[in-house]
Image (cartoon, rainbow, N blue to C red):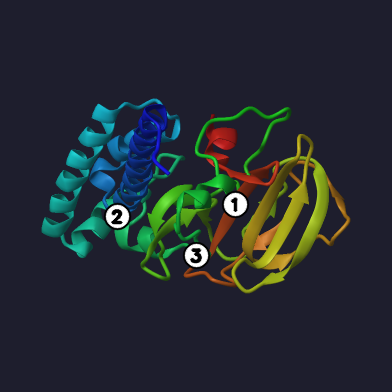
């Protein structure tokens, strides 16, 4: 049975749309890996990715993106893995209190099992954007150094690219950890990845997690107040040094703790 002229036009139109959509998805995937593997152009690459995800693109944008991908690929082939790690290590030595740690030490102290990017659906459970809460979040530590930010990184244990779902805050063994806000303890136990950890439920469907603790001072079901001691810093579970992995979730979506802590 022969297709009508209108049917053929519709088929051609649909085919073109599918080709463009496939190109956009492929571009987005490669852009994500580019952002993970090369910090030097990470900001621009991630900006391009967000544009694709917002669907604010044209056929010319798709063509331009693939030209950019060729440029990124050429850069990858000329940059050694060790040099990439050095750039990354320099970035994460920043300390929000203004101090600096030695690059090698900052790069080592951390842990956790990062999210492995296996497709665009990996990003459905994580949000990089700013947000508003109905209450204030306080610092879980009084003296610390940031050794790994929220987002893309090279895992300190695996050496593989992934998405870090919290904030690594290095501190001395036994340093007191405090509840970031009033809430109810959901979990206070051991996990192979988190080690000894505390999970607290707060208002506005927010949950905070405090991981790799040396010891816990609360139990499941306890009511805690903001600033109350709940645990002590350690290096239990998947960890390379004494630090607190501080994680926040809202509506079961992982969010960046830095927006709540540092504004």
- Residue 71 visible? The answer is yes
Residue 45 appears left or right of 263: left
Observer-nearest of 257 and 216: 257
Residue beneath label 2, please?
Answer: 37
Q: Along the polypeptide, which appears first: circle 3 or circle 1?
A: 3
| Residue 60 x/y as whole percent | 24, 28
* x and y percentages locating residue 39 in the rendered image: 28, 47
**Mark 1 crowdedness (10 Å alpha carbons): few <14, some 14-19, many ≥20:** many
Q: CA distance from mark 2 to mark 1?
A: 24 Å
Residue 130: quadrant of the picture: top right
Q: Quick one: SS at disc 1?
A: strand
Res 86 → quadrant: bottom left
Q: Residue furthest front?
A: 1
**Residue 193 numbered tag:** none
Earlier along the polypeptide chain: callout 2 or callout 3? Answer: 2
Asked which secondary structure carries label 3, the reply is loop
Residue beneath the point at 46% across and 40% down: 97
The residues tagged by marks 2 and 3 sit, at their Cα atoms, a distance apart of 19 Å
Which residue, given by chain and number where applicable, does mark 1 sit on? Answer: 246
Q: Quadrant of the C terminus?
A: top right
On the image, the x and y values in percent for residue 114 come to 49, 60
The residue lying at 69 percent from left, 63 percent from top is 197
Q: Residues within 10 Å of mark 2 (few under 14, many from 20)?
A: many
Q: Quadrant of the N terminus?
A: top left
**Residue 93 visible to the viewer:** no
Of callouts 2 and 1, which one flags the residue occurring earlier in the amino acid sequence? 2
**Residue under the image location 88 percent in, 56 percent down:** 221
User: Relative to 212, is 180 on the left or the right?
Assistant: right
Residue at 35 percent of width and 40 percent of height: 24
User: Compared to 198, does 62 lie above or below?
Assistant: above
């Amino acid at each position: 049975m022969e297709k009508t002229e209108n049917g053929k036009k519709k088929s051609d139109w649909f085919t073109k749309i599918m080709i463009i959509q496939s190109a956009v998805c492929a571009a987005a995937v490669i852009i994500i890996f580019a952002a993970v593997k090369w910090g030097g152009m990470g900001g621009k690459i991630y900006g391009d990715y967000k544009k694709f995800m917002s669907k604010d693109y044209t056929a010319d944008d798709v063509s331009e993106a693939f030209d950019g991908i060729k440029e990124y690929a050429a850069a990858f082939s000329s940059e050694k893995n060790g040099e990439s790690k050095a750039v990354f290590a320099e970035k994460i030595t920043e300390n929000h209190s203004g101090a600096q740690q030695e690059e090698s030490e900052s790069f080592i102290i951390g842990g956790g099992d990062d999210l492995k990017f296996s497709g665009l659906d990996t990003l459905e459970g994580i949000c990089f954007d700013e947000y508003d809460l109905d209450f204030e979040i306080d610092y879980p530590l009084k003296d610390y150094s940031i050794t790994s930010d929220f987002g893309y990184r090279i895992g300190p244990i695996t050496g593989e690219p992934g998405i870090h779902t919290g904030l690594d805050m290095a501190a001395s063994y036994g340093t007191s950890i405090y509840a970031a806000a009033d809430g109810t303890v959901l979990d206070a136990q051991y996990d192979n990845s988190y080690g000894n950890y505390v999970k607290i439920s707060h208002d506005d469907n927010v949950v905070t997690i405090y991981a790799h603790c040396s010891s816990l001072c609360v139990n499941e079901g306890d009511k805690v107040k903001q600033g109350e001691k709940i645990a002590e810093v350690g290096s239990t579970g998947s960890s390379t040094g004494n630090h607190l992995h501080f994680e926040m979730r809202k509506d079961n979506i992982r969010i960046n703790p830095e927006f709540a802590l540092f504004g």
